[in-house]
Amino acid sequence: MNFKEGTIIPIDKPYGITSFKALAHVRYLCTQANDGKVKIGHAGTLDPLATGVLILATGKMTKQIETLQAHTKEYAATIQLGATTPSYDMEHEVNETFPTEHITRELIEQTLPLFMGDIEQIPPTYSAVKVDGKRAFDYRRRGKDVTLKPKNIHIDEIEITDFDTEKMQLMIRVVCGKGTYIRALARDLGRALNSGAYLTALRRTRVGEIRVENCVDYEHFDEWLQQQEIEK
C-alpha cells in the first residue's frame, strides 16, 4: 500500500458522524502509519445519520474521486409514513402528522414507479447544496427560508423489502445515480401517497462494484491498517 501513489479504501461509515469526521480520523491514522502527511479525499458524502459505503482515496487516486462519485449507488432505507420532520430524517423532531388509513402495500407499489427513471428532484433544504456561496442548511439553522432548484437525477430501481402496516414503516431498496437524496425521495413519496414521510434509517450498501460487506469497519480501522504492508 503506497499512500502517495494512491490507494482506494472503502470504509463502513458508522451512525452519527459526518463523512468529514470519518475522513479526518482515517487521515490521522494513515499519517501516523506513514510517518508523514497523507493526502486523502472521499467520494460521495453520507449524512451523519446514514451508514455504509464511504469510499476514500489517497494520493494520486484522489484524481479518480469525480469518477467514483458518478458510480451507481444502492441504499437500504426505512421510511416512516404519516409524519414529516423539517429535515425529512431523524435529525429533527416530527413537525406534522398526516392520515395513513388509506395507505396499502398495493397503493405504494402503484406509486413507486413515479420515481423511477429520469426524474427531477428538489434537494432537502437541510442539505449541503450551496445557495449564494453558503450551504442551504446554514440558512435553515439560522431560521431562514431557502428555495432550491430541482435537479435531474436517475433512479434505476425501487423495491419494497418490507412494510409494517401497524407501524406504517416502509423498507425499500433503491438503486440510483449521482445526486439522489433518499430523504427527498421519502418526502416526495409521502406527498404522492397524500400523506407525509421521513427517513428513520439509511444504509448505503453499494457504490459501483464495492459492497458494504467488503468495506473496512471504521471502528476497527486502526487494527486493519496495522495488518497492511505500507510503502514509505
Image: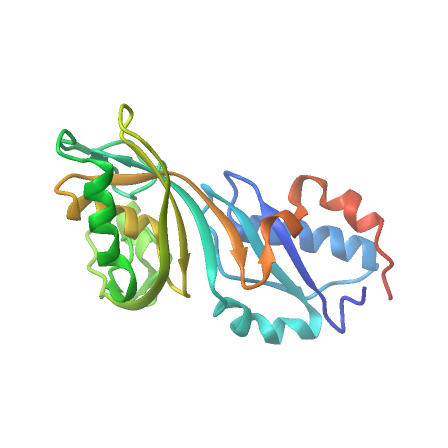
Residue 187: % across, % down: 24, 47
Q: How many marks?
A: 0
Q: How was the colour assigned to the protein in this rendering?
A: rainbow
Q: Quadrant of the N terminus?
A: bottom right
Residue 224: % across, % down: 78, 47
- Depth order, front residue of 222/9: 9
Q: Is residue 5 left or right of residue 18?
A: right
Q: Quadrant of the C terminus?
A: bottom right
Q: Using the rendered view, name the quadrant where residue 218 is placed.
A: top right
Above or below for 171 versus 53: above
Asked if one can make out residue 170 in the rendered structure from this viewpoint, the answer is yes
Q: Residue furthest top?
A: 166
Asked if one can make out residue 215 in the rendered structure from this viewpoint, the answer is no
Q: Using the rendered view, name the quadrant where residue 117 is placed.
A: bottom left
Residue 190: % across, % down: 21, 43
Residue at 72% x, 66% y: name it: 7
- Depth order, front residue of 102/9: 102
Q: Is residue 149 left or right of residue 73?
A: left
